[in-house]
Amino acid sequence: MKRFLSTLVVSALAVVAIGGLNGLAAQAAWRNTANMVTKNYPVSAGFTDISITEYYADVKLRTSRDGSISVTTRDAEDVTHTVQVVNGTLTISRPEPTMGERWFHDDDDDPTVILYLPAGNYGSLTVNTTSGDVETAGQLNFSAANLTTVSGDVDLAGSVTGAVNCTTTSGDIELKGPTLGAVQTNTTSGDTEITGAVIQSLKAESVSGDMDLERTTASGAIEISTTSGDVELESVDAASLTLSTTSGEVEGSLLSGKNFSVSSTSGRVNVPASTAGAGACTVSTTSGSIRLTVRP
């Protein structure tokens, strides 16, 4: 009886395994024969907020030339996106990929979702994707932005009056909006760059990614923390700054004097004398050097 049961179990497992292999084989065949096609989805209903959920496709928000609103996708022929307005939110989503699609997905397929919008101001923007990039045009402004990707890059060019939250694992984050609210970024190995922006505040965290701020001022605090990444500031100012890294270097220029408090275990330290009554600038490293100047 035991031998019979064992044989039965092995046979059942074999059937499951063969079925799984056949399924993957079918998906592999799909991968070899799938055609990438372009589809258009017009949008006529009114909306304020935008929510986009993707997996592999790059997500791009561009200005339309004729003032119309539409979605253009480039994906496998059998993939149909859902584009609808629900409770004042324009939602764009793709069906969840099958296991075979996940296994045999090729970045060279280059799927894309493009949302065309008239230049102007919109409500909150939420984008979630796995390996796709997220990119917005400079003429599109939002009340808030929540952008999340794993290995894709984030490129936000427009202004955001409220909170900006950007999260990636290995992707880079680049913010170029002229005005931004409270900014929070988080990466593991991706770099973070903010250029030419007036912001409310910044809290940026990374493990090995570099932090680069250029011509950026904050009415509130700037807090930057990284383990092995470098921190570089060029013409930066804030009510207060807290910069922390373990083995990375901190260097650059500030627009106004600060009350400096710096510490480094084995790195070199070179900062200006403190300015009485100025905001705090606290910098700490373990083995990285600290070099800051003040250039109004």
Image (cartoon, rainbow, N blue to C red):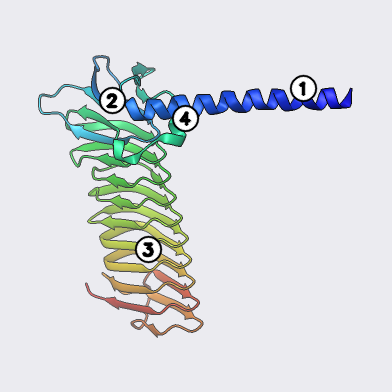
Q: Residue at x 25, y 39 (%)?
A: 136
| Earlier sequence position, callout 2 versus callout 3 | 2
Residue 160's tag is none
Distance between the Cα atoms at labels 1 and 4?
A: 28 Å
Marking on residue 8: 1
**Considering the numbered disc 4 on the image, is that residue within a helix, a strand or a loop?**
helix
Compare marks 4 and 3 and give the one earlier in the sequence: 4
Residue 100, numbered circle: 4
What residue is shown with label 2? 35
- Few, some or many C-alpha atoms within 10 Å of disc 1 (few <14, some 14-19, many ≥20)? few
Q: CA distance from mark 4 to mark 2?
A: 16 Å
Residue 1 horizontal side relative to residue 164, left or right:
right
Q: Measuring from the top left, give residue 190's x and y in whole percent.
A: 39, 55
Give yes or no for contact between labels 4 and 3 (Cβ–Cβ under 8 Å): no
* Amino acid identity at mark 1: Leu
In three-dimensional space, the C-alpha distance between marks 1 and 3, rounded to whole angstroms, equals 57 Å
- Residue 153 image offset from top left, x and y in percent: 33, 47
